[in-house]
Amino acid sequence: MKIQKDQILSCNKSEIESHKENFDFLSQKLNKQGHDVNNILTRLADFQVAIPSWALGAGGTRFGRFSFFGEPSSLEQKIEDIGILHSLTQTAGAVSLHIPWDIPSDYNAIKEKANALDIKFDAVNSNTFQDQKGAKESYKYGSLSNTSKAVREQAIQHNLDVIKIGDKLGSKALTVWLADGSCFPGQNNFQTAFQNTQDSLIDIYKGLPDDWKMLVEYKPYEPNFYSTVIQDWGASLMLANGCGDKAYTLVDLGHHLPNSNIEQIVSILQLKGKLGGFHFNDSKYGDDDLTVGSIKPYALFLIFNELVYGMANNPQNPDLAWMIDASHNVKDPLEDLIQSLEAIQEAYAKALLVNQDELKAAQLNNDVVKCQEIIQGAYRTDVRPLLEKARLTRGGAISPINTYRALDIRGQLIKERGKNTVATGL
């Protein structure tokens, strides 16, 4: 299924006048405050977030999974679903594949389909947290950290194979996340596990093309609940530094203990030139993978405030990889992703409204109240008209959710695919 431009234009007609009124009011207000509205719109329109191929079907827990039907049963259909998201939001212009869930059967055909929908291939993700059919070795007790050299070699080779797959598609980054760890005291030797992981990552790093990056992800717990080999950003940073200049830390917003100061983490990583990218989601208790901005929108804004500062002041840090990583257990996956994209853009837009010069002056004067007023003033601004305008300039929908429902996209997908299709992934 592909949404036509005239369908979006038709849906926009009922909302265009209200949008113009709201945008004109906000634009005048921001111009009086000294903001360059056109520059903000350009930055919002250019901002693209990768959609993970594994998150286009219904998510689930170990207790159950409830489909919304019409799920994509092939990589081709997943890219078509991302095309729907991109048509509506104009900010979902990339896909992040997880291997071996989504190995293309015809590389040229997949690239042609993605290109026709204006979708690029972002970071490719390896999977050594599950045993694959026909695999000689098991990852039950770890992969890159395993005490068995044969297991480690199998995991290394899988990552090298993933790099080759990504290279054929035009991807420029490999994301490595490990489930490696232990469930009980004494089960692992912490130093041996860490050193095995470092040595394995170095072997993978040697297989990176010159223009690629390696993104090392971390997580404090789960599926192991006593120790995790790459448990925090410090461990990730040490491993990245141990590999070389093309290795970076990847921050998943859900991969932190409650109340961690994530904005401070990303700020320091940018200062050191080692922040590689993001997995966006939200959480209440732990790695819940909830809709971005649904629980802690102010925290998301504060993170973006540091990112905006870092992007302007830390040229030593490369361009960042942005990706959603969520599990839509009780929502239509496409609606959930639309909401996530909106929340990311909203946090970014508000961060662009922070007057960094005024904030710096207040910080130097230790004017704590002024600092708070500047930050919260930007956060309290309703920036939705800016997001709508940015979408309109690229031919997107004023209200992606309303348009999605008005066009009965899920109903059309069910008609095309039926009710029994199941997407690989979450």
Image: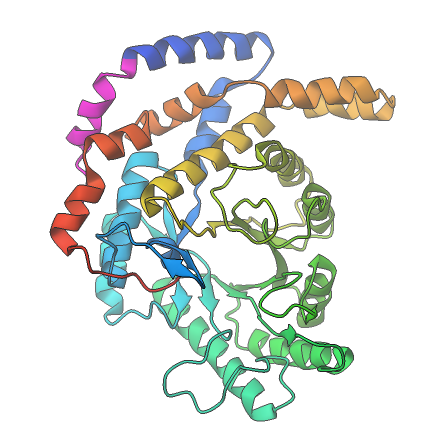
Q: Is residue 2 magenta?
A: yes
Query: At x 50% / y 25%, what residue is drawn?
Result: 40
Residue 1 is at least partly visible in this image: no
Q: Is residue 246 magenta?
A: no
- Viewer-proximal residue, 165 or 405? 405
- Viewer-proximal residue, 195 or 296? 296
Image location of residue 367, percent across then percent down: 84, 20
Query: At x 41% / y 13%, what residue is drawn?
Result: 23
Relative to residue 354, is residue 345 depicted above or below?
below
Image location of residue 193, percent across then percent down: 70, 80
Horizontal placement of 268 versus 52: left or right?
right
Magenta segment: 1-16
Horizontal placement of 399 versus 151: left or right?
left
Image location of residue 246, percent across then percent down: 61, 64
What's the magenta bit mostly, secondary-structure-wise?
helix
Query: At x 77% / y 26%, what residue is drawn?
Result: 360
Relative to residue 393, is residue 250 depicted above or below?
below
Query: At x 46% / y 60%, what residue is drawn?
Result: 123
Seen as rendered, the residue at the extreme front is 63
Relative to residue 238, is residue 60 depicted above or below?
above
